[in-house]
Every structure is written in C-alpha cells, then in structure tokens.
Image (cartoon, helix red, strand yellow):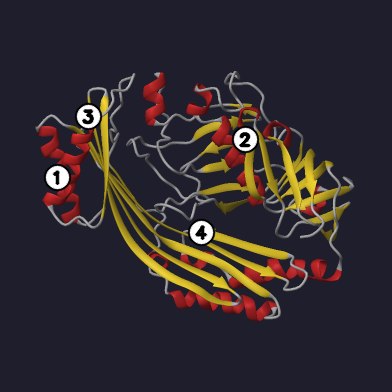
Amino acid sequence: MLEQETRELLLSARDRAAASGVRATFVLHREKSHLMRIGNNSVSLNTSEELTRLDVRVIDGRREGTHTSLGHLTGREYVDEALAIAAAKAKVAVPKDYEPIQECVEENIDEADQDDPALAGLDPSVKSGIYAEVIDALGKNYNFSGSWSSGRTEIYLVSTCNSNEACHSGTDQRFTVVLKHPEKKWELQNEQTGWKAVDVKADEAISALGSLLPVYEGTAGVRNEPGLYTLLLGPAAVAELMLYALWTGAQGRMYEEKIGWTAGMKIGDRVFSESISVVDDPGDDLTFRFGFDRAGRRRRPFPVIDGGNLAGLMYDLGTAAKYGRAQTGHTLESTSMSIAAGNGPENPMDAIKGLGKVLVIPALHYMNLPNMSKGIITGSSRFCATIAMDGVVTAPIFSTRLTDSFRNIFGDVAAVSPRRVSVNLSSTYGRRAPVAAGVPSYMVCRNVRMTDCADSF
C-alpha cells in the first residue's frame, strides 16, 4: 500500500466528491525508471526518472471529463484542483450516445507479489558490468549496442462508487544486447526479462550469441526466394505474432466495429490449429501479473483461444458501455498472455528433423498490418535468422519478410515446445506499463508465405 499520507489525500478527495454528488475516479500512477543504452561498445545513455501522474475522471450524466496532473501530490489543493478541472470538462463535454460506466473497485486489493527492491534500486554499475562482461567474452572486434530498462510501477485506484481500494506495486526489466559485425553487417541479439534483479545473466547472453557465431562467421548468408516455407519460430516471434492476432481479433471493440479479422465469427468457431490455446492469465508468473484493471475489476484467467477455437472477446469499460456488453477485466494497457505448452520434443532441432528446409526465425521486426480486417500481418527476420536442413543449422539467411494471415500462420502447426518462457512486450514510450507473455520456447508452423527476400542482412 502507498504511504499513508498519499493514501489519505486521495481517500479524502474521494469522500468529498461523493458527499457533493460528483461521480469521480482517481488513479495514481507512480514510476521509478532507469534506462541504460549501449552504443559502440560503451555506455551511451544512463538516465533515471521518478514520475507521478494523477488521472481523474468525472461522469456527469452522459458527459465525462478527464484530467491528468503530472507531479508529486503536494496537498489537498493539488488533488482538488485536478478534480475541479475534470468536473469542468465534464460539464461542457459533448454527450455520448450511451450511458458511461463508472470505475468501481470490486474488492480491496493490495498486491506486491512481483516487487523486488533490489531491481527497483539496481545500481547502474551492475548494468554496465554485465554489458562489459558480455563484450569482453565475445570480443571487442564486434560492435555492441543495446538497452536495459528497469524500474518499479505503482498504481492506486479509488472511486466514489464505493469505499474499496486497489493498489499494485511491481518491478520489471528488459535487457537487450546486439552484436554486429562491423564489415559484414549481420546482427545477433539476445533479450532477457523478469521482475527480479537476478533474472538477467551475462552467461546467458554469452552462450546464446556465442553459439551462433560459428554459423555466421563460417558460412555465407543465403538469399531465400519468395514462397511457402516451414518456419521454426522462436518465443519472441510467437509472442509478437500472437499479440497482434489478439489485438485485432479478440478485442471487443474490433469485433463490434467489424474492423478485426474475427468479424462475423462466433464464439466456438475454429481460428487456429487445435494445438493452440491462449489464456489471459494474471496469475502466470512468466507475465507481469496485474490483479485488477483500471476499471477496478478483479482480473481472473480469461480463455481467448481454446484448442484453436475462439473462446472469448476482451471488453474494456468504454466498449462494454457503448455496446451493452459485460466488462471482462480488460480496461488496461497490458494483458498477461499465456500460450499453452505443447508435446513437441525439448530440442527444437528434433522437432524439425525430416521436414527438409526450415527457416529458423527467433523474432520478427518492422511489423505492420497491411489488412487488419483479413488479419494479414507482415514482419521481417533480422537477428539470428538461419536455415536448418533436416534439423541441422547450415547457414545464416538474409533479411526475409513474412506476409501472411494469422489464420494461416497458426493454422498448420507441426510442433509446440513443452517448455514455456517469458517474453517482454513492453513499449519504451509513454508511462511505464510492463507487459510480458508466457509462451512456448518454439513453434513449428508449416506453409507460411515469405514475400520479400533481400540480398543482404
């Protein structure tokens, strides 16, 4: 829970608003963030910040007004001013064509299950030391870059709906290191994540990058021809593709406005291979767990894809109000996407034996949606992509672009890893809103269309 003085400031403002008949919600968002960037084998940026935002929403009939104050809460006048501005905006707002729903904290929540003080206060020298260890081990003849974001996020939510309070505190980090050959221009990347300071390890980066160096140093890059391929997707590629698939196909607003690729479908319709099940699970420790949403609803496991079938649509507060649907606990910036493990072999190379030529793509980059309503996505291989022949990696590949539909990519799945890992999907822009997914460590997808193949890395 927040320090008592801050808590009492917000509770007293809530109680005054309620006593005067104002329907108001107060959300305090506080973050402590640190970012280090590496460029040309040395620290290029080392910065930190502590920010406090107070978001106030007021509902006046069918009108609503919102206001955000940026800065530490200095006293009653500060909070009252934010409330007054939001109320004034509500009075002059254009009425909605539906009844807005007020945020309402379902039950008292005070969670800090994923809060590590050691990570929140991690000394920058620890970060620079791990980068130095990686660079020294792999050789300064390469060009190293990367970034490492870490911090703590605190959120406190109350409204005039009732007397309940919801408080969240959690730490998170995302570590990236990129090794680039200065002349040949190929790049290798390692990413790590977690909510504890010890979750990032230099040895893991050294091992992951070092294992690929003989392939990239000893074999010329290969240009692929456009066509259909079997792909061995790494966890980052699986997570990124599924994130886009759910954003465009499982959000209530996309569905109701018929702009997503599931428009016209029904719950229970087949959308993916039967080997794919996805749950938004706030209890999955491979994700950044968040037990309530910004509407105050307690978050519980929410099936989205069940055995390849569409199992649920995610409705935030605004969409639920507009279309008369039930909220599902998704008025938030981050889901806890959890993709079920499969029964494939532990070693991904064993999963592709006998499949001939396979493109091994750990992650996708420069992603976009050429046709959202048809669920068509595009993304390019960049780091660590290789060719494997009958389960043996033979060569690195030049940049190769995937452009296909979600239903086709996830429609013919040959194998899914029995082991799950965490993939960080957080944005580095805007307020701190940590997002991570728990996904299989690999997925083998057949007959996926590659549309553009470059002549270089």
Q: Is residue 341 above or below residue 454?
A: above
* Residue at image location 42% in from the left, 69% down from the top: 47
- 309 left or right, relative to 104: right
- The amino acid beneath tag 2 is Ser
Q: What residue is pinned by disc 1?
A: 80
Rounded to the nearest angstrom, the CA distance separating label 1 from label 4 is: 38 Å
Quadrant into which the C terminus falls: bottom right
- 290 left or right, relative to 25: right
Splitting the image into 4 quarters, where does residue 3 fall? Answer: bottom left
- The amino acid beneath tag 1 is Asp
Residue 149: tell me if it is visible. Answer: yes
Q: Secondary structure at mark 1?
A: helix
Tell me residue 412's x, y (percent): 76, 34
Foreground pick, 150 / 291:
150
Rounded to the nearest angstrom, the CA distance separating label 3 from label 2 is: 46 Å
- The amino acid beneath tag 3 is Val
Tell me residue 423's x, y (percent): 58, 52
Q: What residue is pinned by disc 3?
A: 92
Q: Disc 4 or 3, which lies upstream in sequence?
A: 3
Tell me residue 41's x, y (percent): 60, 77
Q: Disc 2 or 4, which lies upstream in sequence?
A: 4
Rounded to the nearest angstrom, the CA distance separating label 4 from label 3 is: 45 Å
Give the numbered dot on residue 194.
4
Tell me residue 418's x, y (percent): 68, 47
- 333 left or right, relative to 259: left
Number of the front mark, 1 or 3 = 3
- Are the residues flagged by discs 1 and 3 in contact, CB closer than 8 Å? no
Foreground pick, 301 / 172:
172
Give the numbered dot on residue 277.
2
Q: Secondary structure at mark 3?
A: helix
- 129 left or right, relative to 444: left
